[in-house]
Image (cartoon, helix red, strand yellow):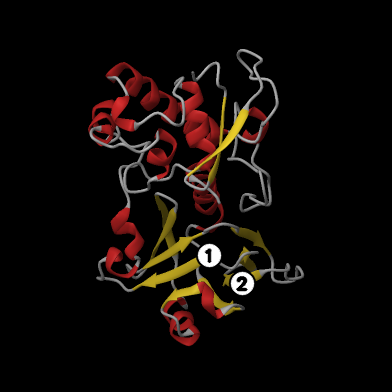
Amino acid sequence: MPELPEVETVRRGLMQISVNQRFTGAEILLRKTLAYPTDPDHFLGAIQGLVIQDWQRRGKYLLGKLSDGSILGIHLRMTGKFLWTTPDVPVQKHTRLRFFLEGDRELRFVDLRTFGQIWWVPAGTIVESVITGLTRLGVEPLSPDFTADVLATCCEKRQRPMKTFLLDQSIVTGLGNIYADEALFKSGIHPTRKASSLKMSEIEKLHKAIVEVLETSIAQGGTTFSDFVSTTGTNGNYGGMALTYGRTGEPCRVCSHPIERIKLGGRSTHFCPQCQG
């Protein structure tokens, strides 16, 4: 599933290619992609003629501001991606929605697993009342609100393993399997450690590691471990720099001990037992 760096990469791509572009139409190829409104005619009529003014990100959600004050909400889920192309290019397999824009341009939503969702939120409507998942999100890890003290408060009295703690979107939003593993390695924290057991010095290291890992991945265009690509079809480059994730049995980049993998909360977890002992 695309995590914060991948979604941020898509947001930046959308800012470059689609801002100030006007919708001239759309084609819904998979009705279930529409989360709200669920009626295709309603959705098409709502966005017709509107101009994309801005793109923001909240956790793993993309929020496009349209010229009438309405919002276009998008969640890529496991395999969703956008491709910027022209209408004459053959429609790719698994294309679920086609946005037509002025200048003979097209933005296609491609989604192999069909879990991706798109919302249109009318102007004047509280966005969270339509995209209800936004109400369950915690602090943004790249915002000024995310401090070591805030992280420490979140850790207090929580008995969960650190890996599952970091995957909880109501605590720190946007982190997923890849970057939770990477941040724990950089901070020297074993993934099975209970959150409440961390000392302040360890929390400060973890806070710094989370920010560094996310910023590094964004600079590399995210990670392509499955089928993630940017809006121009470019693969993310962070995968080749990964410290632990996806490197089971390979030597640790620091101590050369083989990277190990266990399951925590049903998710694969990669770590170095020597560096994170």
Does residue 113 appear left or right of residue 52 in this picture? right
For numbered disc 2, what is the local secondary structure? Answer: strand
Cα distance between the residues tagged 1 and 2: 9 Å
Of callouts 1 and 2, the N-terminal one: 2
What residue is disc 2 on? 96
Question: Residue flagged by tag 2: what amino acid is it?
Answer: Arg
Q: From what the image shows, is residue 144 above or below residue 169?
A: above
Name the outermost residue toward the right: 90
* In-front residue for pair 249/79: 249
Quadrant for residue 68, please give it: bottom left
Does residue 7 appear left or right of residue 207 in this picture? right
Residue at (27, 68) in percent of width and height? 129
Residue at (45, 80) in percent of width and height? 43
Tell us which disc is closer to us: 1 or 2.
1
Question: Residue flagged by tag 1: what amino acid is it?
Answer: Gly
* In-front residue for pair 26/192: 192
> Which disc number belongs to residue 125?
none
Q: Would you call the spot at circle 2 few (<14 residues within 10 Å), some (14-19), or many (20 or more)?
A: many
Q: Would you call the spot at circle 1 few (<14 residues within 10 Å), some (14-19), or many (20 or more)?
A: many
Q: Position of residue 118 (x, y in %)?
A: 47, 68
For numbered disc 1, what is the local secondary structure? Answer: loop
Q: Position of residue 7 (x, y in %)?
A: 50, 49
Name the outermost residue toward the top: 255
What residue is disc 1 on? 116
Q: Position of residue 153 (x, y in %)?
A: 22, 33
Do tag 1 and tag 2 residues touch (Cβ < 8 Å)?
yes
Q: Position of residue 79 (x, y in %)?
A: 60, 58
